[in-house]
Amino acid sequence: MMIEVENGVQLYVEDLRPVDGGNGQTIFFVAGWPVSHRIFDYQMQMLPYLGYRCITLDLRGFGKSDKPWHGYYYDRFAEDISFVMDVLNLENVVLVGFSMGGAICTRFITKYDTGARVEKLVLAGATTPYLVKKENPSAFGLPLVQIDHLLQQMQIDLPQAISDFGGTFYYQYISPEYKSWFQHMCLEGASHAILQSGIALRNEDVSSDLTQIQIPTGIFHGAHDQIAQFQGAVATQQAIPGSLLYRFEESGHGLLFEEKNRFQATLLDFIKNT
């Protein structure tokens, strides 16, 4: 379905509901940069069978959503999520944010959610508290020059830049067919959306947002993540009171695929037991 969020801008939303009404719990998935809702395919295949209503969306500029020229920053993305939740009248939500989507979810919770809708938060390979290394020599994060080079290459040869980026996404072996599928998924995004949201990803820092989160939070992170480094997950866990950190030993950034069975089992355990 398409849901209007702002001045005619519509977002593509998938809403899978168990035939028997399910267990009353909704899992809302938010994708990262520069992928679409398809990154959650393996989760969406299985979780409705277990009674969960599963919702995912394409952020503006990506996948099947509209691709306006404007609005590619965390506050706007977070407000878009708020519009979608209002339209669907959601309650009892487990919010799952992947990569940049995780950072956007933290902004949504601190700025737009009063606690009435989202009960639990899962940050999967999240780019929190930030992506780019700070001036402190001991700080984690990617060098600014590396991110700037990627953004520059996207203006020169976007398919090659996406291919190079995809090469750092996974730790385990990925078949050529999957690589091709991943590349196609990323290139469904508008080039201006990929570039502008990439700039936001480079510049944004959600450190202050993390300290304000008061709901149960699980941090799922690949030990070999070359994009959102594992030290960022540790810092995130330290910043969110009472949060739990789950280390995925056989994954890079793509833990949703690389350890899909463990991801699902850990997600279900977190939902049921925290």
Image (tube, helix red, strand yellow):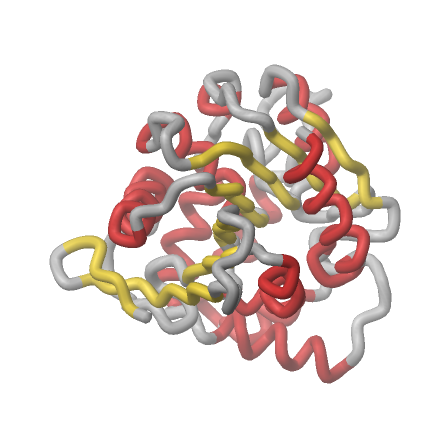
Residue at horizontal 67 percent and vertical 35 percent from the top? 219
Residue at horizontal 52 percent and vertical 42 percent from the top? 94
Q: Position of residue 135 (x, y in %)?
A: 59, 23
Q: Position of residue 61 (x, y in %)?
A: 35, 63
Q: Nearest the camera: 138 or 190? A: 190
Residue at horizontal 72 percent and vertical 65 percent from the top? 167
Query: Is any atom of residue 40 visible in this view?
Result: no
Q: Quadrant of the C terminus?
A: top right
Residue at horizontal 37 percent and vertical 70 percent from the top? 190
Horizontal relation, residue 11 to residue 245: left or right = left
From this view, report whether residue 138 is shown above or below residue 193. above
* Residue 173 lies in quadrant: bottom right
Q: Nearest the camera: 165 or 87? A: 87
* Residue 174 lies in quadrant: bottom right
Horizontal relation, residue 178 to residue 60: left or right = right
Q: Residue furthest left?
A: 7
Q: Residue furthest front?
A: 20
Query: In this figure, what is the number of numbered marks?
Result: 0
Query: Is any atom of residue 215 visible in this view?
Result: yes
Horizontal relation, residue 162 to residue 77: left or right = right
Q: Quadrant of the N terminus?
A: bottom left
Q: Position of residue 74 (x, y in %)?
A: 37, 41
From this view, report whether residue 55 is shown above or below residue 65. above
From this view, report whether residue 184 is shown above or below residue 122. below
Q: Position of residue 63 (x, y in %)?
A: 42, 70
Q: Nearest the camera: 132 or 249? A: 249
